[in-house]
Amino acid sequence: ELSKLVKASEALFKALGFGEVQILELNMKDGKAKVRIMNNFECELFKETGQPSSHFVRGLWSGWFQALFKREVRNVEVKCIAKGDKYCEFEIFT
């Protein structure tokens, strides 16, 4: 079931120490999603850059959603701790 997969993925991400994930939106039909990550380990390291810096995490979630949607996806980091935002947020779409 999809909701169990989402919850398991959120829990795994946190257990690995990568941050706290919330999948805010998930539209299987349109191939769209929005993901928020609090305490993103990657961007916490690059707070001084002033630009989106979550390349590893963005790639990880891109692969996850590409497998889920069974289509190629784009993933844009629209908010980032390294830019001064309180969390990182990604918009994923096919």
Image (cartoon, grey):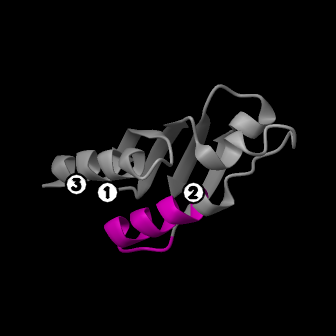
At 69% across and 44% down in the image, what residue appears? 43
Left or right: 94 with respect to 3? right
The residue indicated by pointer 1 is 29
- Among numbered discs 3 and 2, the one appearing first in the sequence: 3
The residue wearing badge 3 is 5
**Frontmost residue, 33 versus 42:** 42
Percent x, y of residue 67: 36, 72
Element type at marker 2?
helix
**Residue sitting farthest toward the left:** 1
Residue 90 lies left or right of residue 31; in this view the side is right
69 within the magenta span: yes
Residue 12 circle label: none
Q: Could you tell me which residue is drawn at 34 percent across and 46 percent down? A: 10
State the CA–CA distance, disc 3 to disc 1: 17 Å
- Residue 12 to residue 86: above or below: below
Q: Which residue is mark 2?
A: 57
- Extent of the magenta region: 57-72
Circles 1 and 2: CB distance less than 8 Å? no
State how many labels appear: 3
The residues tagged by marks 1 and 2 sit, at their Cα atoms, a distance apart of 24 Å
- Give the amino acid at mark 2: Val
Q: What residue appears at the point 65 percent right and 50 percent down from the top-left corner? A: 42
Q: Is residue 25 above or below residue 57?
A: above
Q: Residue at x 17, y 49 (%)?
A: 4
N-terminal label among 1 and 2: 1
- Which amino acid does the dot numbered 1 rest on? Lys
Q: Are marks 3 and 2 in contact (CB under 8 Å)?
A: no
Q: Nearer the viewer, mark 3 or mark 1?
A: 3
Left or right: residue 48 versus residue 64 is right
